[in-house]
Image (cartoon, coloured by chain):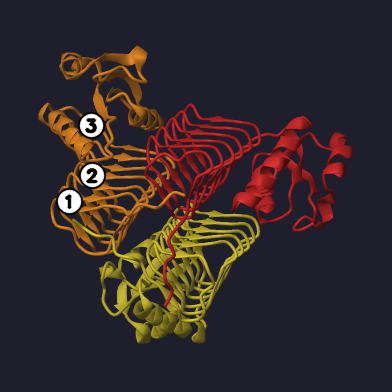
Chain colours: A orange, B red, C yellow
Amino acid sequence: MANVAILGSGGFAKEVAELARLNGHQVVSCYSVAAGAFETLHRGYLAEMQRDRNQFEAVVLGIGATDRRSLSIRRGLVDWLLENRFACPAVVSPSAVCAEGVVLGPGVVVAHGAILGVDSRIDAFSVCNSGSMIGHDARVGSNVVVAPGAFLGGNVSVGQNSLIGPLSKVLQGITLGEDTLVGVGCLALRDLSAGQTIWPRFDQAR
Amino acid sequence: MANVAILGSGGFAKEVAELARLNGHQVVSCYSVAAGAFETLHRGYLAEMQRDRNQFEAVVLGIGATDRRSLSIRRGLVDWLLENRFACPAVVSPSAVCAEGVVLGPGVVVAHGAILGVDSRIDAFSVCNSGSMIGHDARVGSNVVVAPGAFLGGNVSVGQNSLIGPLSKVLQGITLGEDTLVGVGCLALRDLSAGQTIWPRFDQAR
Amino acid sequence: MANVAILGSGGFAKEVAELARLNGHQVVSCYSVAAGAFETLHRGYLAEMQRDRNQFEAVVLGIGATDRRSLSIRRGLVDWLLENRFACPAVVSPSAVCAEGVVLGPGVVVAHGAILGVDSRIDAFSVCNSGSMIGHDARVGSNVVVAPGAFLGGNVSVGQNSLIGPLSKVLQGITLGEDTLVGVGCLALRDLSAGQTIWPRFDQAR
């Protein structure tokens, strides 16, 4: 239970703000390049967040990622938060399931309906979005976005700064390197080395 | 909490009847071309529903859709209910998540485990079936069936009388016109104009 | 509420042990070829389980399956438990939804977030894993593993000893014979006869 500032002001920020409130926090201010959905709470961007840091106890990161570009921007903000030693609690939906032995790093977001298997570990500032399924003993590095409905099998390992697309599938035991991208609905049947991408085939419209 | 009549008598009607009961309603009668699963409650079809309308306070529509034909039949029944000014409450599973700012039209069905994102809007008589995931700020027109496990990204817009198949994926920001059909498991990466269909490839059995 | 022994010691065994505890049971011992995750509780394998059978009241099967080989091993253990008349309660996650009329056989596992539709029936020792969606009136034979996020439509029938892969889709009304395998993410649009397999296409990495 803390007064928190949110960094970001778009749709994902609205979702994270709700999770923060459901975790008993109070969202007291918003910092972003634009006011977006937080008109009355918007106070500026990073310089102002530094200036105001005595006015809140913790920060939640309300920036998602849907491609390499946004993931890279997100990494920059994560590093800025870490360098400046802001307190960043994990926020977890009451409708998510964190099984026994789950370990969440600072700044992790576990959204509605996500299921984190026994002894899985999610590192700093990663996102397990709505309805995602993380297998037992999985290891998810920092700044990884697991999109809605995605499936990571048991013992999967995902390197930092990776993006696992909506309803994509990573088979049990697979290792994905850093900076990997599994596109929407795609299937990772074999290991991926750092920087690799799996991209979806196009379904024909008619 | 009302005495409700159900229109329809198949498997989907059983599911909707359960949701109605979980919402505190009592299902007192069933109207359909056949008695189906509602033998003791079956009273006839539309003429009898009109005749009996003083015997219940509201109606829930227990007809789903899995193709264009059933979706068109469903549209006809929706229009009949609207023209005849039956009260049609939304029914929402207690295990579904409706985030902050979600707006549900009359007759909407939100099934078990569905997750409706912040500020999404579901118009009259649409269905968010089991485990479906609706992104923040999404707009879903009337008589749209979002099948189990389907994913609509943030800011997606779906025109009325559309069918989003099981475990299909509509990327964030995509606009689907009226009468569109996204087949089971398919991926909508680009906008669809009215009437368009995306159909799945066949996985080979061997 | 019983003192239960768990058969198996890997990741799935950890998940089933948690479900057993959430159902009020106490896991008092583990039998497996290796101690695995249950070091202090491990007592040996099948001979020792027979020997110790007065020390627990029931058994939960903590062996999953991800291919034909592991499914066959699982069948052997199921038959051994049945022949030796061990009591094997179903275990059901408190976050799963079992709709009205659902019937679960002995030894069934219903994991976190699974949704079992109205009047569906799951036979002995089958698994509905995390986030799987079973349609109304579906019939699932014994020793079937429905993997995470898989979808079975209404009135689907699955023969015993089958494997339904993660996020795969079986359309409403489809009948799958015994010993069928639907690969990860695959789509079953037509009936499969006994022993048939649907295997996924490979998404290209680049």
Residue B157 position, x and y percent, is: 47, 34
Instruction: Quote the CA–CA distance across marks 3 and 2.
Output: 16 Å
**Mark sitting on residue A88:** 3
Locate residue C184, reporting x and y percent: 37, 64
**On the picture, is B28 further left or further right than A142?**
right
Q: Residue at x 33, y 49 (%)?
A: A184
**Residue A144: which numbered mark, if any?**
2
**Which numbered disc flags the more N-terminal residue, 1 or 3?**
3
- Label 2: how many Cα within 10 Å (few below 14, some 14–19, many 20+): many
Instruction: Tell me, yes or no, if residue A62 can be seen here.
Output: yes
* Amino acid of disc 2: Val
Marks 3, 2: nearer the viewer:
2
**In the rendered structure, the residue with mark 3 lies on which chain?**
A
- Label located before the other in sequence (3 or 2): 3
Q: Nearer the viewer, residue B81 or A117?
A: B81
> How many C-alpha atoms fall within 10 Å of the one at disc 3: few (<14), some, or many (≥20)?
many
Q: Chain of mark 1?
A: A
Same chain for the residues at labels 1 and 2, yes or no? yes
Image-quadrant location for residue A81: top left
Q: Are circles 1 and 2 on residues that touch, CB within 8 Å?
A: yes
Q: Position of residue C130 (x, y in %)?
A: 42, 57
